Image: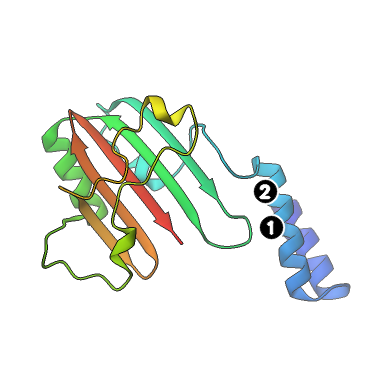
Amino acid sequence: MGFLLFIYNFLFVTIFPASIVRICLLMLSGIVSGGCNHAMESNWVYRRVLPPTATEIKEFYQTDDFLPDYEYYLRAKISGAEFQRYCDTLGLKLHSDSSQYSDGIGNLHTGYAKTENMNAWWDTMYKSDSLFVWQHGDEWNIARYTKGYLYLYAHEH
């Protein structure tokens, strides 16, 4: 990271306008980190706050290297009490007919499997009942508990 900062400072100060440098560095960081459409262990907060007893953890995420847009999917086997503590930790509240959101409620769903591999473990496609939700601007965290599993779909559009 220090090397990238050095390159950024050198290019920003001496050669190119900031916007061009930012775009180049974002492209480079995508190459260095493996680009988008990741399906590997990550350091996302959603995974870090899982209870230590969580098992059968699956995740998938994709990011847009040029925009802050992302989609993140997490499934983990946890108890109902652990699910409630998980929601409390992330500030998710039970959705109801009286819930108010500043973004379109068309975003209020649990997403769909993005890859063939996800079809094997993401089985809560587009359901909108029994959701626990946190929303700010165009960022959404949506969780549900089904058949002993936490399903979390987080996205920014």
Residue holding disc 1: 26
Residue holding disc 2: 30
Q: Is residue 115 left or right of residue 150?
A: right
Figure disc tally: 2
The residue that appears at 18% across and 28% down in the rendered structure is 148
Asked whether the residues under the numbered discs 2 and 1 touch, taking CB atoms below 8 Å apart as contact, a structural biologist would say: yes
Q: Is residue 6 left or right of residue 135?
A: right
The residue that appears at 33% across and 70% down in the rendered structure is 103
- Neighbor class of circle 1 (other Cα within 10 Å; few <14, some 14-19, many 20+) is some
Distance between mark 2 and mark 1 Cα atoms = 6 Å
| Residue 94 placement (x, y as % from top left) | 14, 55
Q: Secondary structure at mark 2?
A: helix
**Dot label at residue 124:** none
The residue that appears at 58% across and 63% down in the rendered structure is 67
Asked if 84 appears above or below 58 in the picture, the reply is below
Q: State the colouring used for the structure image.
A: rainbow
Please state which of residues 16 and 106 is positioned toward the viewer in this rendering. 106
| Residue 32 placement (x, y as % from top left) | 70, 43
Please state which of residues 49 and 22 is positioned toward the viewer in this rendering. 22
Please state which of residues 65 and 123 is positioned toward the viewer in this rendering. 123
| Residue 149 figure quarter | top left
Asked if 77 appears above or below 82 in the picture, the reply is above
Q: Is residue 34 left or right of residue 68?
A: right
- Neighbor class of circle 2 (other Cα within 10 Å; few <14, some 14-19, many 20+) is some
Residue type at tag 1: Leu
| Residue 55 placement (x, y as % from top left) | 30, 24
| Residue 154 placement (x, y as % from top left) | 37, 51
Residue type at tag 2: Gly
| Residue 100 figure quarter | bottom left
